[in-house]
Amino acid sequence: MDDPAAVQVIVHGRVQGVYFRAFAARRAVELGLTGYARNLADGAVEVRAEGEREQLKRLVGYLKSGPPAARVEKVVTEWSEYTGEYRGFGVKYYSR
């Protein structure tokens, strides 16, 4: 990897119950990224992803619009160092 990185993205708005996690996972896999997407108790969705920085930027772009039924109101991103801790990209069902 030329420029490995990690990003945490918290997406606020109407993002639960609209297949947002599946949308995020599909896009992440297409981009060759690893990590997960999960619902948070406050109604937001958290996406953690690792891989090439340019691909991560593309994922963030997708998350800013989301799937057709979603209404994204705010996206908060936090960049960090690549860890290599994820083997694939998954959907988590509980945020406890």
Image (tube, rainbow, N blue to C red):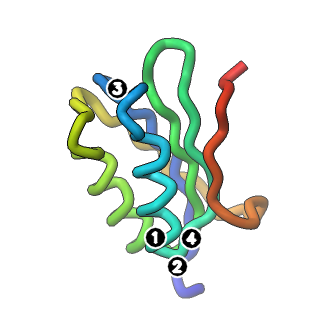
> Marks 2 and 1, Cα distance to the nearest angstrom?
6 Å
Does the residue at mark 3 contact the one at mark 2 (Cβ under 8 Å)? no
Task: Give residue 64's quadrant in the image.
Answer: top left
Q: Amino acid at mark 2?
A: Asp
**Residue 61, percent from left and from top:** 27, 56
Q: Quadrant of the N terminus?
A: bottom right
- Mark 2–mark 1 contact, CB under 8 Å? yes
The residue at which mark 4 appears reads as: 51
Quick check: 46 left or right of 84?
left
Residue type beneath disc 4: Gly
Residue position marked by numbered label 1 in the rendering: 53
- Mark before the other along the chain sequence, 2 or 4: 2
Labels 2 and 1: the sequence-earlier one: 2
User: Which residue is pictured at 29% across the width and 55% down the height?
Assistant: 62
Q: Callout 1: 10 Å neighbours few (<14), some, many (20+)? A: some
Viewed as shown, does residue 22 lie left or right of 94? left
Find residue 16 and name its label: none
- Mark 2 or 4: in front is 4
Would you name the residue on which mark 2 appears?
3
Q: Residue 47, relative to residue 75: is it above or below?
A: below
Q: Nearer the viewer, mark 3 or mark 1?
A: 3
In the image, residue 17 above or below residue 57: above
Instruction: Please tell me whether mark 4 sits on a helix, a strand or a loop.
Output: strand
Mark 3 / mark 1, whichever is N-terminal: 3
Q: Nearer the viewer, mark 3 or mark 2?
A: 3
Q: Residue at x 51, y 55 (%)?
A: 25
Secondary structure state at the residue bearing disc 2 = loop
Q: Which residue is mark 3?
A: 12
Name the element at disc 1: helix
